[in-house]
Image: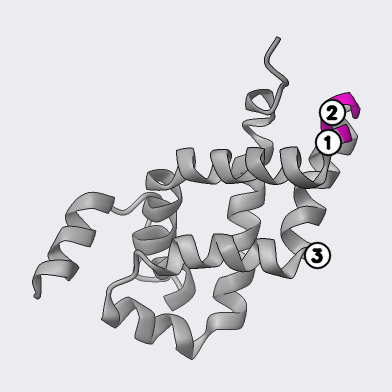
Amino acid sequence: MNQRESLLKELRGEAIGTISPQSSTEEVFQNQVLRPILKLQNDLFVATFENYINKNKKDFYTLSIEKKLLLIENAIQKDIKFRNTYKGMIIGLFTLAEYGLYIQNSSNLNKRMMNMLIERLKSQIQLFEKSA
């Protein structure tokens, strides 16, 4: 194991979620790689979304909770450049072996990644309130 790989694994910590012999390859990847990275990068994800709404969606703070949740979802699903920014923050913390697994099934793993990110941001909606 090279230095970068061991540093990344140490930084991310243990797998999050249950992995059983019946788990699919995608499920194992999600719990061993994606969830720990999403947890590690959470503060950066929140700051990035805050920057996005301050630059592009100034009316965000006046929206109802339901519309804010919808905006989070739409921003990540429909704004390709913004979504790619988040993907880069995640993929940049893959080891070479993990990247090899990722590129074999990137479409499904991207969906998992973005859905998990959307849910993570939605669950922290209270952090996106305008400071008085």
User: Is any part of residue 113 visible from this angle?
Assistant: no
User: Which amino acid, by three-letter code, is at mark 1?
Assistant: Lys
For disc 2, the marked residue is: 65
Q: Quadrant of the C terminus?
A: top right
Q: Nearer the viewer, mark 2 or mark 3?
A: 3
For disc 1, the marked residue is: 58
At x 57%, y 39%, the residue is: 46
Mark 3 secondary-structure assignment? helix
Q: Earlier in the sequence, mark 2 or mark 1?
A: 1
- Marks 2/1: CA distance? 15 Å
Of residue 65 and residue 16, the one placed in the foreground of this image is 65
Magenta region, residue range: 59-63
User: Residue 40: percent from the left, percent from the top?
Assistant: 37, 46
- Marks 2/3: CA distance? 20 Å
Mark 1 secondary-structure assignment? helix
For disc 3, the marked residue is: 78
